[in-house]
Image (cartoon, rainbow, N blue to C red):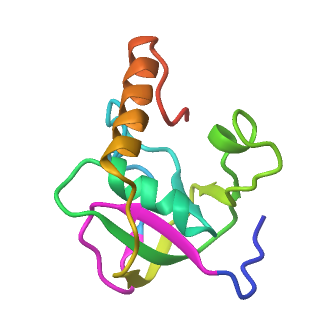
Amino acid sequence: MTSTEAVIFYHGTRADLRVGDLIAAGYTSNYGSRRKANFVYFSALLEPAVWGAELAVGDRERIYTVEPTGSFEDDPNLTDKKFPGNPTKSYRTREPLRVTGEVTEWQGHSAEQLKVMRDHLEALKRQGIEAIDE
């Protein structure tokens, strides 16, 4: 997939970035065992980026608007396993994402929702399953 006509894409993280910076694969992942990330993940919906920011390792939660610099595909961790048809509009790419701005006002999840998600991810980890399977 390469079309990005009039679509705003989001990337949730805790990295401190500026407009024009590139978010690239090949660095330590923000999730799981923090191994080298083979893909960069992003979404056309704000909600998946909120989860990304909240679950990432680091100090301050951030959500950036981004534009893909190359081709991308549906995120198989969500689309094939959890949400057929990609209703979360979640994608991944091996090409960098360019930061185009920062979303400074967004609503995070409740402490209870975060606990449920973290408990779920911890249970998967105990089973040897990474949250992001690359």
Asked if residue 44 lies left or right of residue 74, the reply is left
**Boundaries of the magenta span:** 8-22
Q: Determine if the magenta segment contains residue 13.
A: yes
- At 51% from the left and 37% from the top, the residue drawn is 132
Residue name at image x 59 percent, y 64 percent: 43
Residue at x-position 52% and y-position 71% = 10
Q: Residue furthest right?
A: 85
Residue drawn at x 25%, y 47% is 57
How many marks do you count on the picture? 0
Q: In the picture shown, does residue 66 fall above or below 93?
A: below
Task: Place residue 117 in its image quadrant.
Answer: top left
Quarter of the picture containing the C terminus is top right
Name the residue at the left extreme.
Answer: 59
Image position of 59 (left or right of 66)? left
Majority secondary structure in the magenta region: loop
Q: Nearer the viewer, residue 65 or 25?
A: 65
Q: Image quadrant of residue 126?
A: top left
Q: Position of residue 69 (x, y in %)?
A: 59, 74
Q: Quadrant of the N terminus?
A: bottom right
Q: Position of residue 93 (x, y in %)?
A: 60, 57
Q: Is residue 72 above or below residue 82?
A: below
The picture places residue 119, in percent across and down from the top left corner, at 37, 27
| Left or right: 2 as drawn, with respect to 57 | right
- Name, please, the residue furthest toward the top: 127
How far across and down, in percent of the image, does residue 108 sit?
A: 38, 62
24 shown above or below 68: above
> Relative to 72, does residue 120 appear above or below in the rendering?
above
